[in-house]
Structures are given as structure tokens and as C-alpha cells.
């Protein structure tokens, strides 16, 4: 199971969540705040908008605690901040080098024992509030200060920016900090979830949800990229792809459907792409193989390799765009 998601904070500014959902993202981890009680200035808007449009969310809180007692206070602040919203994903403690540096500046020696005690204190307080607890760390910080035992006890959100997942046991993998997503200006972190957290959390009766709570809405469809050809009209493209002019206009921010230009690209719902007669492109996702993409689109590995100048079909990279036909 691979579920496509992202995480944001105030640094992404005002997000157009409808565009994010339309682009196929199925969950978002929102920064709720940091330290003793500082709430991220975009959190309430982000959480409200995601709840409104039915995009499942979790929340994270950045660690600046200098003691386990302070970590428990941070957990209380986090829960107080998020408690008014529906959370289908975990409540996560973000512990990394910037927090460690801050703690050292307060005259406290930052050790592996302290790091692990901070995570345990935050997560246990979250669990005492009947929320699903998780912690976040990158590879180097995890190796230096945390432990596999901690990742077995609590859900682990793992950051490592590589083209292919390395098999580390985790529930969510943050695989890049330079993603580009419709509705968000600039770079954004992108994630893959390997656990159906909404189902797990509802089944366990956590996050104030239970098995009788309605499941989050079905995920939005994925999208492919179509290159507009000379003579194309939006109505003609809509007809070929089995969609509507209104859908294409909204999805691509087109204010005048009579003005489209050859060479520009359009996003089109992926499950409607079979009727296209123009070039169709696909953006490679983590875990993809060329053979899997070929099966999905009714073509062959050799055809894709020939069309894209791929000399080694075993070497394709997440984020690259290839032509399907």
C-alpha cells in the first residue's frame, strides 16, 4: 500500500487545498505548532479547509523541550490546538537537529537518552489523550539519537531524500523537500504512507473517531499530463478524455476555455486518459517500475524505453516525466 501525501507549515503560505486534493494527494500532515505553546499561524486555516473538503489530515509539533516534563507540556499544547478538528492521521512529535541545537543553547546536554525520553514523554501524553502517537526524524538524527526500539513502540515518520525507498521500517516516508504541487507556491515536502492510518485509527477508537465514524472520502483520481496540439480545443480534448470542459478549466485554472495554446500542458484525470490521441506523459512515483507503468497504460517496456531514450529499464527515477504515447 502506498498513499500519496504531503506536509506543510506556515512556510507554504496560504494553500489552495482544493487544488491539492484535485491533484491526487490523499492526506496532509499539518504543523500545529512548536515549543511550549506557539501555534503555527496557518494551522487553523489549513485544518479547517482540509476538513471542509474532506482531505484527511494529521498534525505534528516541533520539539523544543529541554526535559520530559516540558515534552509532555508540548503534547498538551498540541492536543489543545488540534482537538477541534477531525484527524484521520497521527499526532506526531517532530524531533531533529534544530531542536537539539536549541536545547544545547539552554545549557542542557542533548544525549540519546534525553532524545528518547522526550519522544516517549510526548507520545505517551498524546496516547493518554486517546490520540494516535507518532514521531518524526531524519536518518542521521535517528541513527545518532534514537533507536529501532522506539520505532517499534511508536509509529515512525521517516525523512530521507532518495529516489528509492530504502526499506526502513516506518509508517510514512518523507522522500523530498522540493516537491511542486498545484495550489502551493514554492517547494513542499512530499510523503508516502504505507499504513492505512484512517482505518487503523477508527478501528482503535482513537482521535475521537470509532468504527461507526464515516470513513474519509474516497481519494481523488490521479492525473496525467496532456500536451496541447495545434488545432486542439478544450471541448475536443474533454470529449477525447471522457471529461468536461468545466472539469479541465477548473483543474488547470483556465478562465477562458476558448483560449488554449499549442505546446502548453493540461492535467487530465488519469482514469479518463485511454481515449487520448495526443502525447500523454506520466510523472514517475516512488516505487514505480517501468514494467508496472507499461501494464498500467497498456503498452510495453520496450516501447516506453524507445519513446523516452531509456537505455536501462531498471533505472527510472521518482519525479522524472516520461512519455507514454
Image (cartoon, rainbow, N blue to C red):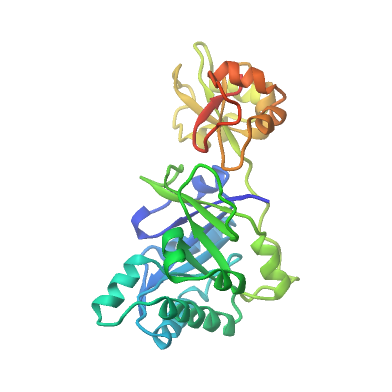
Question: Is residue 316 positioned above or below 109 on the image?
Answer: above
Which residue is drawn at the image coordinates 49% and 11% (left, top)?
230
Q: Residue furthest right?
A: 212
Which residue is drawn at the image coordinates 65% and 75% (left, top)?
206
Q: Quick check: can you spot residue 278?
A: no
Task: Give 118 or 267, whichever is nearer the viewer.
Answer: 118
Q: Residue furthest bottom?
A: 69
Question: Is residue 241 positioned above or below 197 on the image?
Answer: above
Task: Locate residue 78, reporting x and y percent.
Answer: 45, 76
Which residue is drawn at the image coordinates 51% and 14% (left, top)?
229
Q: How many marks?
A: 0
Task: Locate residue 60, reporting x and y percent.
Answer: 47, 68
Q: Quick check: can you spot residue 112?
A: yes
Which residue is drawn at the image coordinates 60% and 53% (left, top)?
167
The image quadrant that residue 289 belongs to is top right
Question: Is residue 263 positioned above or below 272 on the image?
Answer: above
Q: Along the horizontal axis of the image, is 91 left or right of 214?
A: left
Q: Quadrant of the C terminus?
A: top right
Task: Locate residue 314, reporting x and y percent.
Answer: 60, 31
Task: Give 230 or 161, whichever is nearer the viewer.
Answer: 161
Q: Along the horizontal axis of the image, is 305 left or right of 211?
A: left
Question: Is residue 93 positioned above or below 49 on the image?
Answer: below
Task: Give 166 or 106, whichever is nearer the viewer.
Answer: 166
Q: Along the horizontal axis of the image, is 105 left or right of 213?
A: left
Task: Locate residue 312, reporting x and y percent.
Answer: 57, 25
Task: Give 241 or 163, whichever is nearer the viewer.
Answer: 163
Amino acid at each position: 500500500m502506498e498513499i500519496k501525501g504531503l506536509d506543510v507549515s506556515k512556510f507554504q503560505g496560504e494553500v489552495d487545498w482544493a487544488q491539492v486534493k484535485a491533484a491526487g494527494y490523499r492526506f496532509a500532515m499539518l504543523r500545529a505548532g512548536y515549543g511550549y505553546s506557539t501555534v503555527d499561524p496557518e494551522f487553523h486555516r489549513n485544518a479547517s479547509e482540509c476538513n471542509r473538503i474532506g482531505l484527511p489530515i494529521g498534525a505534528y509539533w516541533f520539539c523544543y523541550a529541554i526535559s520530559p516534563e516540558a515534552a509532555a507540556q508540548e503534547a498538551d499544547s498540541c492536543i489543545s490546538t488540534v482537538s477541534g478538528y477531525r484527524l484521520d492521521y497521527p499526532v506526531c512529535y517532530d524531533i531533529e537537529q534544530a531542536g537539539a541545537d536549541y536545547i544545547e543553547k539552554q545549557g542542557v546536554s542533548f544525549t540519546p537518552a534525553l532524545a528518547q525520553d522526550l519522544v516517549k514523554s510526548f507520545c505517551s501524553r498524546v496516547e493518554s489523550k486517546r490520540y494516535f502517537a507518532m514521531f518524526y526524524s531524519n536518518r542521521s538524527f535517528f541513527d545518532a539519537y534514537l533507536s529501532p526500539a522506539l520505532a517499534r513502540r511508536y509509529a515512525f515518520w521517516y525523512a530521507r531524500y532518495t529516489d528509492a525507498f530504502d526499506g526502513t521500517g516506518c509508517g510514512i516516508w518523507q522522500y523530498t523537500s522540493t516537491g511542486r504541487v498545484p495550489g502551493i507556491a514554492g517547494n513542499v515536502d512530499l510523503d508516502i504512507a504505507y499504513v492505512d492510518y484512517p482505518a487503523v485509527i477508527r478501528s482503535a477508537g482513537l482521535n475521537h473517531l470509532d468504527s461507526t465514524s464515516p470513513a474519509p472520502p474516497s481519494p481523488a483520481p490521479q492525473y496525467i499530463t496532456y500536451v496541447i496540439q495545434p488545432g486542439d480545443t478544450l471541448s475536443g480534448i474533454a470529449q477525447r478524455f471522457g471529461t468536461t470542459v468545466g472539469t479541465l478549466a477548473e483543474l488547470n485554472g483556465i478562465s477562458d476555455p476558448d483560449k488554449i495554446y499549442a505546446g502548453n500542458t493540461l492535467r487530465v484525470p488519469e482514469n479518463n486518459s485511454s481515449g487520448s490521441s495526443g502525447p500523454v506523459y506520466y510523472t514517475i512515483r516512488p516505487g514505480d517500475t517501468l514494467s508496472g507503468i507499461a501494464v498500467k497504460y497498456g503498452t510495453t517496456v520496450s516501447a516506453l524505453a524507445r519513446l523516452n531514450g531509456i537505455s536501462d529499464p531498471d533505472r527510472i527515477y521518482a519525479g522524472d516525466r516520461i512519455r507514454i504515447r
